[in-house]
Image (cartoon, rainbow, N blue to C red):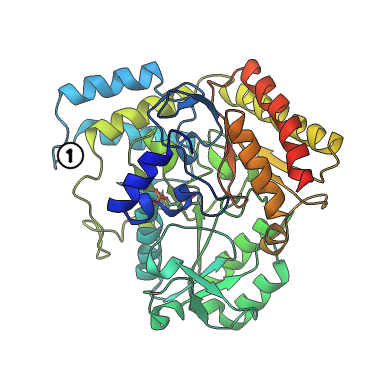
Amino acid sequence: MNASTPLFENAQKHLVGGVNSPVRAFKSVGGTPLFVSKAKGAYLYGPDNQRYIDYIGSWGPMILGHANEQVLQAVREAIELGLSYGAPSEKETELAIAVKTLMPSIEKLRLCSSGTEATMSAIRLARGFTGRDVILKFEGCYHGHSDSLLVKAGSGALTLGVPTSPGVPAELAQFTYTLPYNDVAALHQVFSEAGDRIAAVILEPITGNMNMIKPLDGYLEAMRTLCTEHGTLLIYDEVMTGFRVAAGGAQSLQGITPDLTCLGKVIGGGMPVGAFGGRADVMAQLAPEGPVYQAGTLSGNPVAMAAGLETLKGLSAEGFFDKLQNKTDVLTAGLKTAAHEAGVPLCTEMAGGMFGFFFSDAERVTSFEQATACDAPAFNRFFHSMLDQGVYLAPSHYEAGFISAAHTQADLDQTLSAARVAFKAARAG
Ligand SMILES: *Cc1c(COP(=O)(O)O)cnc(C)c1O
């Protein structure tokens, strides 16, 4: 019994599972989800005002820290000018310019209100542009919850897609092929057999939804080449990695130019914003310039634009990512040391303000299969020990972690001393 328990019990009477997004329910780790009463800087506060060092940052957006004063001030000013117009406003162009400056592969973009909308719309656009139906995705990559993307294939490269969720028609799922991530041979095979039917390849260029996994050397280069050879569009889903692993996203670290990029999370600075954009000739197929329909009542909302703009401005500051990455480095190196001292096998991954850690004796985890083989019960014991000590990690071993500009050395020290206790608890199971 803790202060969140009565709130969760009441929520469950009125909201499905007591939450509005499944992972928040703590099903994977067990126990009662923390109900948040407020957030400031690096901290979340529970219903009893107990403080937690937060490594989720609203699943990525809060890269400047919670309730950042500049962002709040921009939002306050925007609110005074009205909450929504349903008509164009200059702030939308300003955000578009800010995004294009950070991500030069984007020549034109469309703003929407979530990452799910961005990926769903990018897929429709790719199908409309190429006149093809098939899309190719990868095991363990999450692209929001639209029908075509909630699909996982069987083992064979060309087995028909099987829906991951009831409610997704099998007739639709058959157009989604799924391959293992980081398997270049499977990629070559699927393109040689069906390349001229594939409208788009969509992937997380660094994954954050099967814990954090990076592409192996040469993998993305091969993918880019195959897409170009077959007239297939390469879609980078940078909803999580955009403005998070580096100011220019994963694509700026990897030196590969996608045809389209999907954005979300950081671009709204905590408000609901998504975007997709890329090659001008592809984007020109989108309504009102072209025939592919996409729209949104609250798209480009002026208050959300203000939060997004101020957030992008903050993270564009000189040296921002160097400082952030230093903290991530201290954290992941410290976690590794603490784990090894406790005799717990652990490997880590990090870039910019994003990190992952696996309860695995592998040198590196590079596939969904490997991620699935990690010691989930040990993670769960670790998670609860950390939570009891005031450190809030993502409540699933398939999630990445996020650090913000507001985290201090003292926060990291406190986190690592908690981790020394928690790894012992993890092992003791
Ligand atoms: C979060 C996420 C999405 C979905 O974004 P929502 O805003 O939750 O709809 C899509 N793709 C990736 C890579 C994500 O991390």
Under circle 1, the secondary element is loop
> For this view, does 363 lie left or right of residue 217?
right
Quadrant hosting residue 371: bottom right
Mark 1 residue type = Pro
**Quick one: 214 or 261, which is closer to the camera?**
214
Residue 342 seen: yes
x and y, in percent, of residue 258 in the image? 52, 53
**Quick one: 163 or 21, which is closer to the camera?**
21
Residue 355 seen: no
> For this view, does 50 lie left or right of residue 256?
left
| Cβ of mark 1 under 8 A from ligand 1 | no
Residue at the image point whose x is 47% and y is 58% from the top: 143
Which residue is at the far front?
Answer: 1
Binning the other alpha carbons within 10 Å of mark 1 as few (below 14), some (14 to 19) or many (20 upward) gives few
Q: Which residue does the numbered mark 1 point to in the structure image?
A: 88
x and y, in percent, of residue 32 in the image? 48, 44
x and y, in percent, of residue 372 in the image? 68, 61
Image: 210 above or below 91: below
Residue at the image point whose x is 78% and y is 51% from the top: 360
x and y, in percent, of residue 172 in the image? 40, 78
Residue at the image point whose x is 16% and y is 22% from the top: 80
Quadrant hosting residue 130: bottom left
Quadrant hosting residue 96: top left
Image: 182 above or below 421: below
Query: How many numbered markers are drawn?
Result: 1
Residue at the image point whose x is 68% and y is 41% from the top: 382
**Quick one: 163 or 122, which is closer to the camera?**
163
